[in-house]
Amino acid sequence: MFSLGRILLVTDATWKKIESKIIYYAESLCKEYNKNEPQNKPLISFNEKKMERVFEVYKEYNRIIHSFMLNNEAKPTNFEIPNTELSDRIDRHKVASAFLASIIEAQPMQINTTENVSVNLRTANESLSFAIGCHIITSFVNTKNICANKILSPKCCCEDREDYRMHFVKIVYRLKSLFRQKNFDAAVLFFVSHVFFLLEQCSIEKQ
């Protein structure tokens, strides 16, 4: 478990733990998607050199979240934070959303083909970012020590075709340009963090 401070700063030690999980999930995806391919011609690969970029972008998104929470001008007029002590807290759901955005921007999963690119291949970075977001939520303990041991996705009415995770991944894939635009709107990160919060609450109730 990782401890959650008043303002979350990912230390080198914590980053190494998250990095190892990113590599683990990335290699798992590569193994799954390349299982029917020749070893010397993988459809998709993981560029570990992009990890430094992931962390650099994460720190920038973390700064954006923190600034957004403290900047009254950036908040809707009918939204008030009770006090500064609460307003400068960056919880695990926001950390998860920041890492989701940083992985999507850094694109460590790289497609090696242009022929018959499946949905799974196209959304590999989004799948990786979702897995890491869920891992972070279950790894950071809040002040009441209430967190889900595992993120359990809601059941979809069409689960025989696609599960909730895939629905989420495909939506994020379609919206990924929002993370890369010049005038980035921090509200996007807050929206994603609310989705992670709801997923955690759903998981706690199921467990």
Image (cartoon, rainbow, N blue to C red):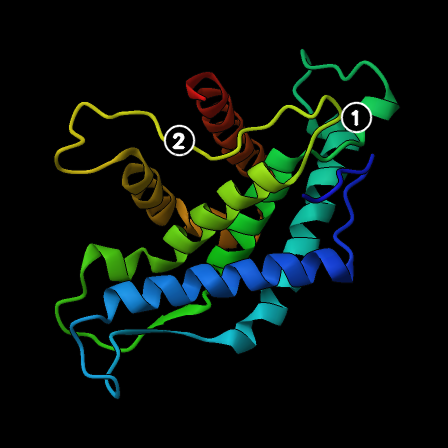
Q: What residue type is labelled 1?
A: Ser
Q: Residues within 10 Å of mark 1 (few under 14, many from 20)?
A: some
Any mark on residue 87, and which? 1
Whether residue 106 can be seen here: no
Whether residue 132 can be seen here: yes
- Dots 1 and 2: beta carbons under 8 Å? no
Q: Which amino acid does label 2 sit on?
A: Leu
Which of labels 1 and 2 is toward the front? Answer: 2
Residue 101: x percent and y percent? 53, 50
For the C terminus, the quadrant is top left
Q: In which quarter of the image is residue 156?
A: top left
Q: In which quarter of the image is residue 64?
A: top right
Residue 184: x percent and y percent? 57, 46
| 32 relative position to 21: left or right | left
Residue appearing at x 45%, y 34% in the figure: 151
> Which of the pair 183/131 is nearer the observer?
131
Q: How many labels does the image show?
A: 2
> Which of the pair 77/179 is nearer the observer?
179
Residue appearing at x 25%, y 56% in the figure: 120
Q: Name the residue under label 2.
A: 152
The residue tagged with tag 2: helix, strand or loop? loop
Q: Residues within 10 Å of mark 2 (few under 14, many from 20)?
A: some
Any mark on residue 53, and which? none
> Which of the pair 58/43 is nearer the observer?
43
Q: Which mark sits nearer the N-terminus, 1 or 2? A: 1
For the N terminus, the quadrant is top right
Residue 22: x percent and y percent? 51, 60
